[in-house]
Amino acid sequence: MQAQTLAPIQLDRPDQTETVYTVPKNYFQVESGFRTEHLGKDQNIYEFPSALWKYGITDKMELRLITDLAREEGKMLLRPLSLGFKMALTEDKGILPKISFIGHFMLNIKEGIFTKSRSVVPRFRFTFQNNISENISIGYNMGMEWNTENKVPSYIYTLAYGHSITKRIGAYIEAYGFYARNAKADSRIDGGVTCLITPDFIIDLSSGIGLSETSPKYFFAVGISFRTKL
């Protein structure tokens, strides 16, 4: 009976605004994508692929693993793994949003093809969503991230407008950015579309531009995601 009434797959990609929804209990979900960023003169970063692996341990909590294989400055790098969870905190009620919490720890494994990381570093964010109508939603995140090179945190914010054009096609526009003490802000905008092939399989396409000196000039991404019951 649950499979007949299960809502279609919900993603944390392609936007930077993480969804408030968790993977259903006993479901395994993979969100994978290919992304390229143009930083300037012959400077490009390629991610192929980045993947978010999720498993629902309850109806309100999922376990998460993030893996990123990238090519930067002509070198292949497997970025530090991120282990974490997402937990649903409150449901939306009137003007009050649905709220969830996401926490991760980035882990260094070894040197070599792995990026050099001196410690285990945390990152977290709160995710919010207001459903304006059956077809329109506003999602926004606030959080903090640490990197593997220093102990100064970055603050992250996102704001996304999502619209269901049809039952299968969705679109969004988004503004987001990062801010760290004694560093220039990194602000960006992006947009994209999703196409639901089946309730458990979806593809996406997105692109965006940087608005500040420290941002990529532009970026482009495609993705494939699916879920299955274990």
Image (cartoon, helix red, strand yellow):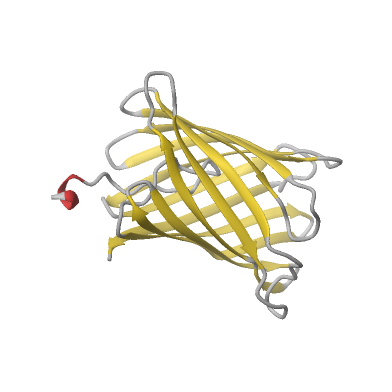
- Does residue 165 lie above or below 220 as drawn? above
- Does residue 6 lie above or below 53 as drawn? above
Quarter residue 167 falls in: top left
Front one among 91 and 224: 91
| Side (left or right) of 79 relative to 101 | right
Front one among 181 and 225: 181
**Total marks placed:** 0
Which residue is most to the bottom?
112
* Rendered residue at 61%/58% (across/down): 105
Which residue is most to the left?
1
Residue 194 location, x and y as percent? 40, 45
Residue 12 location, x and y as percent? 47, 48
* Rendered residue at 56%/50% (across/down): 103
Residue 218 location, x and y as percent? 66, 47
Front one among 195 and 23: 23
Quarter residue 209 falls in: top right
* Rendered residue at 32%/48% (across/down): 59
Say which quadrant the C terminus sits in: bottom left
* Rendered residue at 45%/46% (across/down): 87
Residue 65 location, x and y as percent? 50, 62
- Does residue 222 lie above or below 92 as drawn? below
